Amino acid sequence: MINTAVKHIRRSPYQALTAIMIMTITFFVATILILLAYGSSTTLKYFETKPQLMAYLVKDGTQEDAERISKKLQSDPRVERVKIVTQEEALQIYKELSSSQPLISEFVSPKTLPISIDFSVADLKFTQELISELEKDPKIDEINFTASLGTGQSLEEAVDKLSNISKYLKIAGGVTLTFLILSSLLVLLVIIGMRISSRRDEIEILQLLGATSGFIRSPFIAEGVFYAVVGAFAGWLLASLLTLYLSPSLVAYFAGVPFLPKDLFGLLKLFGIILTGQILLALILGASGSFVAIKRYLKI
Amino acid sequence: MIKFESVTKKYGSTIALDDVTFEVGEGEFAFLTGHSGAGKTTLIRLLLCEITPTSGKVLIEGRDLKSLKKSDIPYYRRKIGVIFQDFKLLQDRTVYENVKIATEIDGRTTPEEEKKVQNALKDVGMTNKANLFPRQLSGGEVQRTVIARVLVQKPKVILADEPTGNLDPQTAMQIVDLLQDAAKNGVTVLMATHNADIVDALKHRVIRLKEGKIQSDVKKGKYEKND
């Protein structure tokens, strides 16, 4: 079966090359899209799970009050990571933030700073309801988002924006990929169909000699699978090499944001998972493309 | 081994075989003669399950071929060796590969099977041409390759449709000798031919067809000039 398939391929190298190139383009784009989807979702996750909210206690709020509220938050499934910031720790943060003006921080006493509780939400959609609930506690003075992204945007706005980008990326990627997979399937169908047409005499002889339909069909299936798998590997390889080449720039550009795994092992693991998925997809694509061609052109 | 019971085959309004009844026993060598269009090829196609009779029964080893399911036909055909006038060799495969394909189809891929392929090539005198492609062979060599392919099939029946049609008398006789050897080994041979010299020389049974009907069936027959 394999030998026959290899002979078919060697006999018409341009058809084989066309099929492999189309598959390569499909799987190259698929790999890039998967990496982009991975990057956007890890970036989104990164921002979503960053400490986002700070609940400041009233001036006479005590450490016991902070611990009571902290316990309540820890038992809430909507909340992730809870941390009490003591007055001393608050002063330390203040000093770090105003390090350019050390004299000002010298005049600040820890007692002037309130105790606060830093926490993040499992999903940003819980933010508003949590704020409303906590504001009812008489020991809480106010609740704030902790940071902006330095571009005038609040974290919530930024996450919303990212979430939208991620959503549209997935939709656009899905549409592009579907289109490319369908194109590849059609190219495969046409090429395998041409192969079948050019081998009518051989098929007739094999039938007369008692070959089963499986014996006749299997080389065509193997051929389709071969094109898809080689194309998948080539597309993955090109995309992976491109990503490896660009990764230092990407890591630098995204600074602390884990758009891609920072260590080589993590990156290789990600590539390995993508390759496994692509090969599985290629097997399905190759077999189904050939199968449709056989159903259409090889009625035995 | 082969039995036709009142077999009629029509293509539309054209009658190719008309109420044909005959029997060929195991290890028997029979010629099928008749002018072009007499029904010889239809008869062979019926035996190959390429077509089914309009009425009547075609039986091999007592089994009605109509009872074969579509999925059984390939396995049935492996018991039938066929030699065609147009050879039907795979042009992109060597002599050796063309013979070996019969064992591959049967799922036989052991080293012993390779030995059988080599022996078959030796029996037909094609060992030294094993690596050549069909286009590099003479007509006689091509037909001997086909016979080698049939021999490795170990068939119970050999159907030969004008196997000497394109060959010179000497080569044609060599081919028929190979078929006679097979018959001596218990294989039933049914050979459709127009070659009067061979039919007259061998004095085997001759079934003569005319316009789809059996005109005569003679144990040690001769070629009729009108054929």
Image (cartoon, coloured by chain):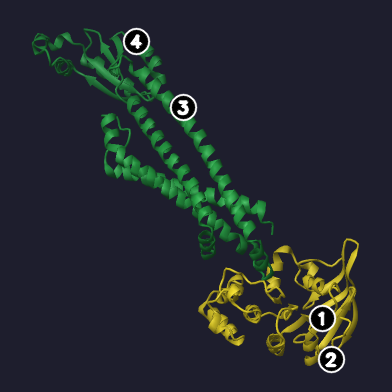
Chain colours: A green, B yellow
Q: Secondary structure at mark 3?
A: helix
When the figure is inspected, residue A61 is found, relative to residue B131, above or below; the finding is: above
Q: Secondary structure at mark 4?
A: helix
Do dots 1 and 2 share one subunit? Answer: yes
Packing grade of label 3 (10 A; few <14, some 14-19, many >=20) is few
Closer to the eye: label 1 or 3: 1
Q: CA distance from mark 3 to mark 2?
A: 87 Å
Q: CA distance from mark 1 to mark 4?
A: 105 Å
Q: CA distance from mark 3 to mark 4?
A: 35 Å
Packing grade of label 2 (10 A; few <14, some 14-19, many >=20) is few
Q: Nearer the viewer, residue B47 or A166?
A: B47
Do dots 1 and 3 share one subunit? Answer: no
Q: Is residue B136 left or right of residue B24?
A: left
Do dots 3 and 2 share one subunit? Answer: no
Residue B32, disc: 1
Tell me which chain the residue with mark 2 is part of. B
- Please tell me which residue is depicted at 45% across the width and 48% down the height of the picture: A232
Does label 3 or label 4 sit earlier along the sequence?
Answer: 4
Closer to the eye: label 3 or 4: 3
Q: Amino acid at mark 1?
A: Leu
Residue A168, disc: 3
Tell me which chain the residue with mark 1 is part of. B
Q: CA distance from mark 1 to mark 2?
A: 13 Å
Q: Amino acid at mark 2?
A: Lys
Q: Amino acid at mark 4?
A: Glu
